[in-house]
Amino acid sequence: MDYEERELILELFPGTPPDLLPLGEMLYWQDEEGRVHIEERGVEGLHLVLEPVGEAPRAPQVCEACRRHLSGSALGFYRHAVGKDPRHLRYLVLCRDTARCASHAEPGRLREILLRGIERRDPGEL
Ligand SMILES: [Zn+2]
């Protein structure tokens, strides 16, 4: 994808919904406290933090980021709030080894996960 095109769109139309922008550089990492971060570089507010919720699933499952089938011990449960409502939580299964997962995950897939956690609706609309 063309980063310059993306920057130009953002400059001209700063309110463009993120899903209409060309895909930017996706950052995906784990911090020292075990939280997983997904961020699209260059767009304010496009940063999702997933907290680990412990207990890994026992049976092999598919990681939602890299979509590989892995054994339960390689995976963990994570959750993030959807929008600004802390009671609206979404759970997903991800590799515990984020660095390795990142090398297999498609940037477009990471963005999908990221956008699901970002509230784009005006509260007055509900
Ligand atoms: Zn993975």
Image (cartoon, rainbow, N blue to C red):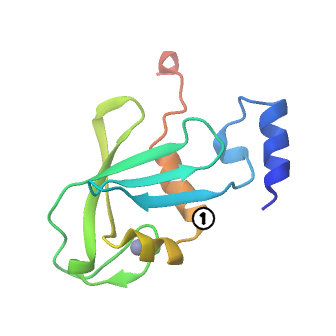
Q: Where is residue 31 drawn, in percent x and y?
A: 35, 55
Instruction: Note whether 80 is above or below 78 in the view shown.
Output: above
> As shown in the figure, which amino acid type bears the numbered disc 1?
Pro
Tell me: is circle 1 under 8 Å from ligand 1: no
Instruction: Note whether 9 is above or below 34 in the view shown.
Output: above
Q: Residue 26's image quarter? A: bottom right
Q: Residue 58's image quarter? A: bottom left
Ligand 1 location (quadrant): bottom left
Q: Where is residue 24 drawn, in percent x and y?
A: 69, 54
Q: In this view, does 76 lie to the left or right of 55?
A: right
Q: Where is residue 10 drawn, in percent x and y?
A: 77, 37
Image quarter in which the N terminus is found? bottom right
Q: Is mark 1 on a helix, strand or loop?
A: helix
Instruction: Note whether 106 is above or below 23 in the view shown.
Output: below
Give 46 or 21, whichever is nearer the viewer: 46
Q: Where is residue 21 drawn, in percent x and y?
A: 73, 47
Residue shown at the point (44%, 44%) measured from the top left: 117
Give 77 or 120, whichever is nearer the viewer: 77
Residue linked to disc 1: 107
Residue shown at the point (20%, 55%) measured from the top left: 53
Residue shown at the point (25%, 67%) measured from the top left: 76
